[in-house]
Image: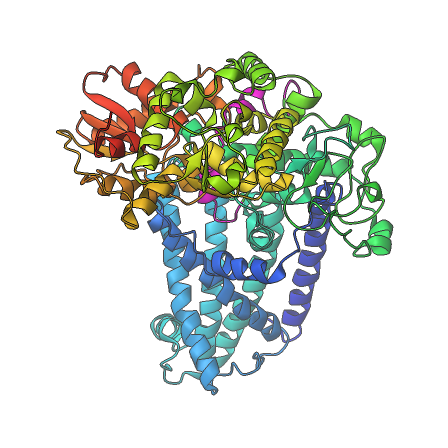
Amino acid sequence: MLRPLMAPLLATVLILAGLTVFLWTISYRIRPLLFARPDVRWDEPATRTEKLLEYGFAQKRMPAKPERPAGMAHIWIFVAFIVAQLGTLTSFGLAYDANFHLPFLTHEARLGQVYLLTKDVIDVLGSLGCAAFLYFRVIQKKERMTLSWEGVFILFMILGVLWTDVLIDAAALAKSAGEVPWYLPVSGRVAEWFLYGMSPGAATTLMTAGVLLHIAIVMAFLNFLPIGKHFHIITGLPTVFFQRLTPMGQLSKLDLEHTEKFGVAKLTDLSWKEILDTYSCTECGRCQTYCPTYDTGKPLTHKEVNRAIRHHAQQAAAAFPLPLAVLAQHLNRIKPMPAPANGHGAHAADGHADDGHGAEEPAAAHSDPATGSEGAFAQGLQIPAELYEKLPPLVGEGGILPDETIWACTTCGWCEQACPVFIEQIPRIVDMRRHLVLMESRFPEEAARVFKGMEGQGNPWGMGSNRRAEWCADLDVPLAANVAHAAREFEWLFFVGCAGSFDERQKKVSRAIVQILKEARVSFCILGEEETCNGDSARRLGNEYLFQALAQQNVDTLKRYGFKKIITQCPHCFNTLANEYPQFDGHFKVLHHSEVIAQLVSEGKLRPGQVELSEPVTFHDSCYLARHNGISEAPRQALISLGIRVKEMERNRTETFCCGAGGGRMWLEETIGQRINQNRIEEAARTIGEQGTVATSCPFCLTMIKDGISETGRGERMQAMDIAELVALGLPQRT
């Protein structure tokens, strides 16, 4: 039997020892954060709190398809874990006072009865959630879940926390041997079935043992978390709170004028939020479900990237100092500097001028001229130069990740949409590319030709810029340069884009859009050879210098004319003009042509007739339209206006599957694994019975889908068409 003084003594030893070891371990986890790149993420606290409640506590992303069963099981575990915290606090108190209870939560109080009933029921639901995950991991062996002893061990630890709580309540009931109250349906049954008949002394001993066992499990659980992937139990909610508030399709703008170092080369070049992201990765594998690189055998899974960087951070932390004196002196004493007039701050060390999170801190306060590495939280908190030099590169020979991993990404955004804790994968990948391109001139050979074409002629093909308007030479399309005060004369500017101007297949789409706009009597013009590439591929391939030159040129041209309303046919043009040109003081109302068509139809300005197609139609959503910008219904409305019933692929709308051309991959060879566009065509063919039309709304997608049809030998039975071409078929054919 446990003596009266033993329980408080043992509890004190367990708690003090557990907290001491935990703080020691945590000190090593926070060191990489302290020396990482600054990133202000505490702006807009009201918005962040709202998102924390919606996505953190309400777990909104968890039950999203295609992982609803696992998502619901996780919600049960999460709720049980939150409710169990009150039980844990009660257990701590019971170790010192057998009659301890939290305020207002006694058995006699109505609030206490409601709490105890909730806790009892939630303990069962949480246990069922654990059982479900044990089934997924051990029996079903879901592909996306890494089978490891750690995952199974944590599930049993959670079960231990929940059921020692039940044991404590059941032993308390057995001690009194009274009638089981209505608000303890689970603990009461356990007491009735297994514990009634015990002597009061034995029940007291069992209750004390349950309390000590509960505390021991909690302390062991707490100390296990920072060691592995379940650190997300501590860091997950902060990661949700500190999520990016800028548009998904917007990348950070580098300060090219006031720095000599660009992108991410080593661990401390990452922002503290990017390192925190790796701590919060649960390795659940949701990012793999519809990931085009994972599904087609490419050397990139974002889960493995997170794990590799996390392990590297944990190993490197052993050599990092913990400057407590500096922290005590400077923590929270640096006030953010007001943003310059254009809204973009600057970081001298890594060139990150603006991540879109509000005012930044002065670069000079953080930069170490010897290393270029900055402290995240306090002035003067810099990694010693010799330690920075010893850090291995993140990418390349002797580094953490191979080059092939970084260049495989299509930036489709599925990983970020699927992640329950909002880990930001794309900005980190692009920043690594930026370093390779701008600092080491190391990039795929094909990209060099694309960069040269964009730089010399303003398009990826390198075709003469003076030929940009040849596609419409016979269509009587007004050129802005030929009309005085063009912005007043025309309501819209049609930003044609490189593919629409130079690609033979996409020129047909451009002509169809012109036909639609004229039929609806829309007042519009084009820039012709004054238009240049929007720069999307350059930026996502890491050539920020080239992107900024192209972007500034376009913004200057658009502002010189005074255009405010722009139509694009390319989702990449749309995303860049709408989400990234504001970084260059270019603020425009931008609509994709699918939105324009849907709007014209709804207003009665466009009345296409029925298009008779003998074979079914499916629609392929562009990642940069549906996922990055939330536009998925407008293209379907355009098809519905033609009397077309769209047969949906399994992966549709925001759950679409990439065509393989995003992230600059349009211009790079694809030699590893299955071609991504062929994977998509296989799905499309299954959907429409191996014959019919795959409708698209993106030049890149149209090219990739068309090529995929041809490459898989379906050219005689299937075709790819833009929605504008289909709508144009339903219009009167004028000569």
* Residue 238 among magenta residues: no
Q: In percent of the image, x 39 and y 26: which residue is there?
A: 699
Q: Quadrant of residue 364?
A: top right
| Image: magenta residue range | 396-422
> Front-most of 266 and 109?
266
State how the image is colored: rainbow
Evaluate whether residue 285 shows in this view: no
**Quarter of the image that includes the C terminus:** top left
Residue 595 drawn above or below residue 447: below
Name the residue: 38% across, 54% down.
Answer: 73
Q: Name the residue at the bottom extreme.
A: 108
Residue 712 placed where, x, y %? 27, 16
In this view, the residue farthest toward the front is 484
Instruction: Name the one closer to the observer, 295 or 366.
Output: 366
Q: Nearer the viewer, residue 131 or 567?
A: 567
Q: Say if 238 sits above or below 699 in the image.
A: below
Name the image quarter holding the N terminus: bottom right
Residue shown at 41% from the left, 29% from the top:
292
Q: In front: 10, or 29?
A: 29
- Residue 686 in sight from this viewpoint: yes
- List x then y, in percent, for residue 613: 15, 30
Residue at 66%, 20% in the rendered image:
398
> Taking 12 as reference, is 322 left or right?
right
Magenta stretch holds residue 397: yes
Could you say where residue 615 lies in the image, as x and y percent from the top left?
Answer: 15, 29
In the image, residue 573 above or below residue 380: above
Q: Is residue 592 left or right of residue 462?
A: left
Q: Position of residue 217 (x, y in %)?
A: 56, 58
**Total numbered labels placed on residues in the image:** 0
